[in-house]
Amino acid sequence: MEYLLKRAYPPDAVFAASAIPLVGALAVLHERGVQIPQQIALAGFSNEPFTTMTQPHLTMVDQRAEQMGQSAVRLLLQLLKRNSQVNHPNVFLKPELIIRDSSRR
């Protein structure tokens, strides 16, 4: 985040691959007095429970991690039960964009 802030044209939004680096970016922005989301909006993947405990609350894409794990276990158990090769079905989990204060302008 510090590198991005030093650029000639700093970003007006940051999207992180997970919540932990996003919280790090949030801390740097707070230290620098950058207003969120007025100057820089923040969003990321994962929707960990702590993303609603920050100020401001973080906009996140919920990847349905719990459903992903349940689907993986269900498919594995089906494969083990059949004890043979089967067609591997595609499982699609629709992500959900949860818009919170860190990106509302």
Image (tube, rainbow, N blue to C red):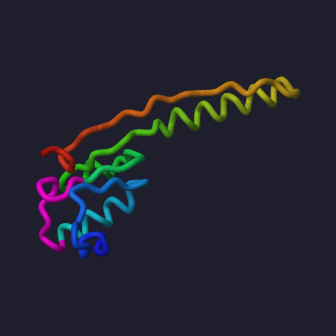
Asked if the magenta segment contains residue 80, the reply would be no
Asked if the magenta segment contains residue 37, the reply would be yes
From this view, report whether residue 28 is shown above or below residue 86: below
Magenta stretch, main secondary structure class: loop
Q: What quarter of the picture does the C terminus occupy? A: top left
Where does the image place residue 33, in percent across and percent down from the top left?
A: 12, 70
Q: What quarter of the picture does the N terminus occupy? A: bottom left
**Which of the 4 image quarters holds residue 38?**
bottom left
Q: What stretch is highlighted in magenta?
A: 31-41
Where does the image place residue 23, in percent across and percent down from the top left?
A: 31, 61
Q: Which residue is drawn at 35% across and 50% down?
A: 44
**Which of the 4 image quarters holds residue 91?**
top right
Of 3 and 18, the residue lying toward us? 3
Q: Residue at x 29, y 69 (%)?
A: 4
Q: Residue at x 33, y 59 (%)?
A: 22
Q: Residue furthest front?
A: 8
Where does the image place residue 69, in percent across and percent down from the top left?
A: 58, 38
From this view, report whether residue 6 is shown above or below residue 95: below
Q: Which residue is drawn at 78% across and 29% down?
A: 79
Of 9 and 89, the residue lying toward us? 9
From this view, report whether residue 5 is shown above or below residue 51: below
From this view, report whether residue 79 is shown above or below residue 34: above
